[in-house]
Image: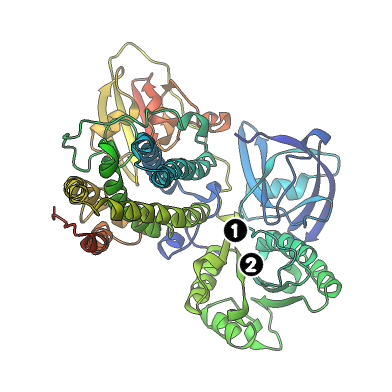
Amino acid sequence: MSRFHPLEITDVRRETRDAIVVTLKPREEDREAFRFTQGQYLTFRHRFDDAELRRSYSICAGLDDGALRVGIKRVDGGAFSTWANENLRPGDLIEAMPPMGNFHLPLEPEAAREYLGFAGGSGITPILSIIRTTLAREPKSRFTLVYANRQVGSIMFREELEDLKNEHLGRLSIIHILDSEGQEIDLFSGQIDRAKCDALFCHWIDLPSVDAAFICGPEPMMLVIAEALRAHGVADERIKFELFASSQPGRLPQKPRRNGAADAAATCEASVTLDGVTRTFSFPKQGQSVLEAALAHSLDAPFACTAGVCSTCRAKVLEGEVEMLVNHALEDYEVEQGYVLTCQCYPVSDRIAVSYDQ
Amino acid sequence: MNNDTMSIEDYLAQGGVLTAPGNAPARYRAELLRLMASFVDSELAGSAGFADTINDAPGIKERIAAARIVLEKADHAGRVLSVMASFGADAGRYAVHHPWAARLPREADIGAVRQGADRRLAVFHYPLRGWVDAVTMNVLMGRAVVIQLKELERVSYQPLAEVFRTITPRETRHAELGLEGLKRIVETAQGREQAQAAADYWHPRVAASFGVVGSARHDMLARLGLRHVPNEALLAEWRAAIAAELAPLGLTVKEG
């Protein structure tokens, strides 16, 4: 299982009003572990009072930049991104897991490929990493970027992209689409919808010559673009997605309520929530796991290995106390938040409330 | 349309794709793990069951084909298990937590019901009996696996869909190897008779592996983008494909 390592913050640059770019340096002994592939992300953790939050942010550096950099855009109500934007300073340490993610294609130095990228807002971060790397490592390949933002002031990496365009003359084209600012060409104003995609593919982008498309942005934008690409004959294998980080739940979790310890009563009253429906039943405190009890009461609770290994049966204890015999799948912070493997759980208190929906 | 906000559930129902464990809502995570566990367990049980067949092979070529199937099915299990591990599963323990070679009696009647604590498809609980039986089962199940993989390649979890896309061509080859072996078997009258008996035994058991007709879970899985084509349509496709493959070999299919 991946472990967290401390990274030193060597630089914090304000990229736009609500986004920063953070440069990070691993310890000497962790350098190998933090070797990344273009388009990957880092998962950070930070403790807020007594709860730990984990957030993933894409690496925006290219493979040959000699640095590890991520972009962090502040999300409304997002505890982690707000904390990072307001508090990170050079010299601080922050903990992260080694790079993960599959948002990339193998590089082929001899290839002369046409790539297409779609980025919405901070969805540019992994795509910037891919563009920087591809232009450097595949000298015959070209990249077209369609980049959607609300307004000019919120465009992340605007200057850096212009510099890349000049550095690799004729190999990087950028189409900016701005939501709330009019442009000379109507096509480049407003939100990306199907009609805009169709127009782009008819007049500006030669889809049949495109070898692969990368999409990273908010969900509705990804749906619209993927649908348009498919309708214009681009096969699924040639479309790579990376879901926008904002879709991850960003708020601090509620601490589970834990009532008094067990007494000698032989049965437990359980309320189990699954798919938004809560059912209440009693079951013996010994001899039957919470999962078995739920199944015995006709709840379609999820499970697979029943050995505490696969984590399919994960649920959250909202009330009461249970004992988990074996746990090979949940991490300490998940257990702290009240998550359990129900196949391994036996009630300690007389009442428990468990939810499979959280 | 607001371009910024949409619930993950709506996104999935409209064909959206998830890309990392952190994106997955609770029910999605559970159903995805369940789907992966079923695949991993079936591949491990299939590989383990086929291992003995290597020693039943009548020639070098057949021996290599059987060994390759054993090797690659274990490798496919490993590839999907690594996706499970990204959700927290302990891959090392998982790979050894069940006796994958264990089988029920040949005449046990378990329908499509999974047995015990592993999630292998029911068909992998039946024991193989010798070379002809193993090859025939591999032809019938091999075609089923390819049809089911075509469906699985469309799952809404991109890292898993990509793994399935690397697996399909090799599983397709396994089914072809089976058919090549079966062609040699039916060259003799005795071989054809044994193959027909094996086909009669395995056909209903493989058919049951497509799951129940009109599954109530299908709609829920479809909304999550984890299923697209209903069980009955996949089953019909398999029935037609198998009938077409067996007919030129002089073998018939007993419906049921």
Measuring 73% from the left and 76% from the top, which residue is drawn there?
A174
**How far across and how far down the image is residue A248, in percent?**
56, 51
Q: Is residue B93 left or right of residue A290?
A: right
**How far across and how far down the image is residue A78, in percent?**
62, 50
Label 1: chain letter: A
Q: Is residue B198 left or right of residue B119?
A: left
Q: Nearer the viewer, residue A129 or B61?
A: B61
**Residue on which disc 1 sits:** A244
Measuring 37% from the left and 32% from the top, which residue is drawn there?
B100
The answer to whether dots 1 and 2 both sit on one chain is yes
* Element assignment for label 1: loop
Q: Kindly identify which numbered label has been placed on residue A120.
A: 2
Measuring 67% from the left and 50% from the top, which residue is drawn there?
A41
* Three-letter amino acid code of the residue under disc 1: Phe
Q: Nearer the viewer, residue B152 or A53?
A: B152
**How far across and how far down the image is residue A321, in percent?**
42, 23
Can the viewer see residue B30 in this picture? no
- N-terminal-most mark, 1 or 2: 2
